[in-house]
Amino acid sequence: MEKIKSSEITPKSLFLSRREFITGLGAAVVSTAFLTACQGTGLSSLPSAAEPSDKPTSYKDVISYNNFYEFTVDKDGVAALAKDFKTSPWTVVVGGLVANPRTYAIEDLLARFPPEERIYRLRCVEAWSMVIPWLGFPLAKLLKEAEPTSEARYVRFETLYDPARMPGQADTSFDWPYVEGLRLDEAMNDLTLLASGLYGEHLLPPNGAPLRLVVPWKYGFKSIKSIVKIDLVATMPVSLWMAASPREYGFYANVNPDVPHPRWSQATERRIGEYTRRRTLPFNGYAEEVIHLYQGMDPRTLF
Ligand SMILES: Nc1nc2c(c(=O)[nH]1)N[C@H]1C(S)=C(S)[C@@H](COP(=O)(O)O)O[C@H]1N2
Ligand SMILES: [Mo]
């Protein structure tokens, strides 16, 4: 695919640097509602001011250290195995409980929803993280075009299933295809992106070309890659990870340093390219934008 023309990109960085976030706290931008909500969800600690501000992870690391089990479980091996994966032609089917079901050729979909640049932190459940300048558009735009019916409560996403092209799908210990889901209000949140590029370039196969989800306040596994199907549904979808290990991977998967994964702590993370570990922030640093979605919910159900 050709390089994205910079004229096609709307520059709009919604990203708050670490320092701006802290200043925001000091300037009482964070309401008492936020603090009360933090207590309500069992989030004890506000972020520490000691951390340096976020700087994007090197392009090389972003495209060569990946989780994409359809190719291999070896993070350093995805790039080589996905190198020749063909992402054209590609169609994305939007359906389920909608008034306007539609099948998009990827080119038409991207022409219809031009990308914006958004620099987001990505926090993997394995306790490493990256900062990535994505090119994408809010999922809400696509969902509005589909017109969810009043029965639609969740969005279900599916990755391509094609074992001939995705060698990792020969591993029968997983229930392919990769499936993920969001509650409809999470899916409609302005932070939730469908990304088709990063660092000003079209996505490469290791990062989920031609279209992947990015949900920055949740653990990385929610950000499903190489999407072929988006369905509006009435009941909570069962994700591949919930099916594989329900005790370890829940539906919500909100980044929460206070709730350890059953096999390791989630309190800190290693930013790829750095040596000193950072403290992990509640909701990966996006609490202000999303905490209202979980008001009144039992924090134990939010892992
Ligand atoms: N289809 C699919 N999507 C996926 C995965 C996967 O194995 N298959 N891995 C997830 C995990 S665990 C993470 S951390 C992110 C990694 O995204 P990146 O490689 O672009 O950094 O992709 C997520 N999306
Ligand atoms: Mo992950």
Image (cartoon, rainbow, N blue to C red):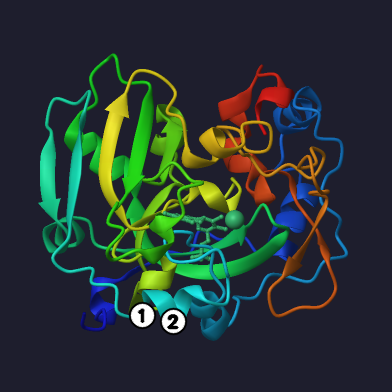
Residue 102 showing in the rendered view? yes
Relative horizontal placement of residue 89, taking residue 266 as reference (left or right): left
**Callout 1: helix, strand or loop?**
loop
Give the residue type that dot 2 points to. Ala
Query: Tag count in the figure?
Result: 2
Q: Is residue 28 placed above or below 75 in the rendered structure? A: above
Residue at image location 44% in from the left, 81% down from the top: 80
Q: Residue at x 43, y 36 (%)?
A: 181
Question: Dividing the picture into quarters, in which one does residue 295 lie?
Answer: top right
* Foreground of the two, 117 or 213: 213
Label 2 CB less than 8 angstroms from ligand 1? no
Mark 1 packing: few (<14 Cα in 10 Å), some, or many (20+)?
A: few
Q: Against 188, is 21 above or below?
A: below
Q: Are marks 2 and 1 in contact (CB under 8 Å)?
A: yes
Task: Please state which amino acid type lies under the numbered disc 1.
Answer: Lys
Q: Which mark is residue 61?
A: none
Give the SS element for disc 2: helix
Q: Which of 168/93 is in front?
A: 168
- Placement of 14 over or under 184, stated as above or below: below
Say which residue label 1 marks: 83
Q: Which mark is residue 80?
A: 2
Tell me residue 90's x, y (percent).
Answer: 17, 60
User: From the image, which quarter does the C terminus lie in?
Assistant: top right
x and y percent of residue 52 in the render?
A: 79, 71
